Amino acid sequence: MKHIKPLVALCVLLPMAVFAQTNTPRVDQREVNQEARIQQGASSGSLTQRETARLENGQQHVQNIETRAKADGVVTRQERGRMHHAQEVQSQHIYNQKHDRQHDFNHNGRVDRFAGRR
């Protein structure tokens, strides 16, 4: 009986420790936020279809980095840094594409020209 209790405790705590090492809630939440920004831009017309497709490919790249980092069961500081950097770059791409004055307000797949002064 003395040997069974520590064994049971080890069996319960070991999977939690492994899960905690691969848990990346900030990265996951940021991915959700960035995907929402892309969808908002596509629905509002501030992103063209081509820009939306490129940004979604960029999001897939970030998800691939995260998947590779989690593959061995441990996300190291270097891997977290790499994920953070990839998300920073993607965030800047989203901002640049949403504010580049190329619009598709009528969602016909063509870039709408800016009606203001040239």
Image: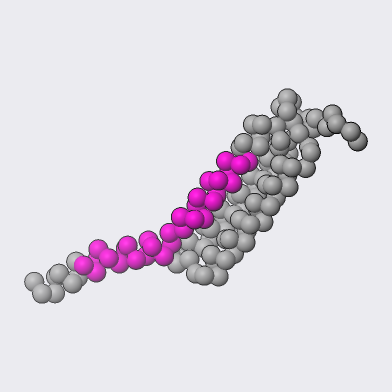
Magenta residues, dominant SS class: helix
Q: Image check: 112 left or right of 9?
A: right
Residue 78 versus residue 64 in the image, above or below: below
Residue lying furthest bottom: 2
- Residue stretch in magenta: 9-38
Which quadrant: the C terminus? top right
Decide if residue 36 is on the left or right side of residue 55: left
Question: Which of the 4 image quadrants contains residue 56?
Answer: top right
Residue 35, percent from left and from top: 58, 43
Q: How is the image coloured?
A: one colour
Left or right position of 67 against 118: left
Q: Is residue 16 magenta?
A: yes
Q: Give the farthest residue toward the right.
A: 118
Q: Is residue 108 above or below residue 85?
A: above
Q: Residue at x 64, y 31 (%)?
A: 43
Front one among 33 and 16 = 33
Q: How many marks do you count on the picture?
A: 0
State which quarter of the image contains the N terminus: bottom left
- Residue appearing at x 70%, y 50% in the figure: 93
Percent coordinates x, y for residue 14 in the rendering: 30, 67
Residue at figure coordinates x 21%, y 67% from the top left:
9
Could you tell me residue 90's position as x and y percent?
65, 52
* Residue, far left: 1
Query: Which quarter of the figure has residue 20?
Result: bottom left
* Residue at image point 14% right, 74% down: 3
101 drawn magenta: no
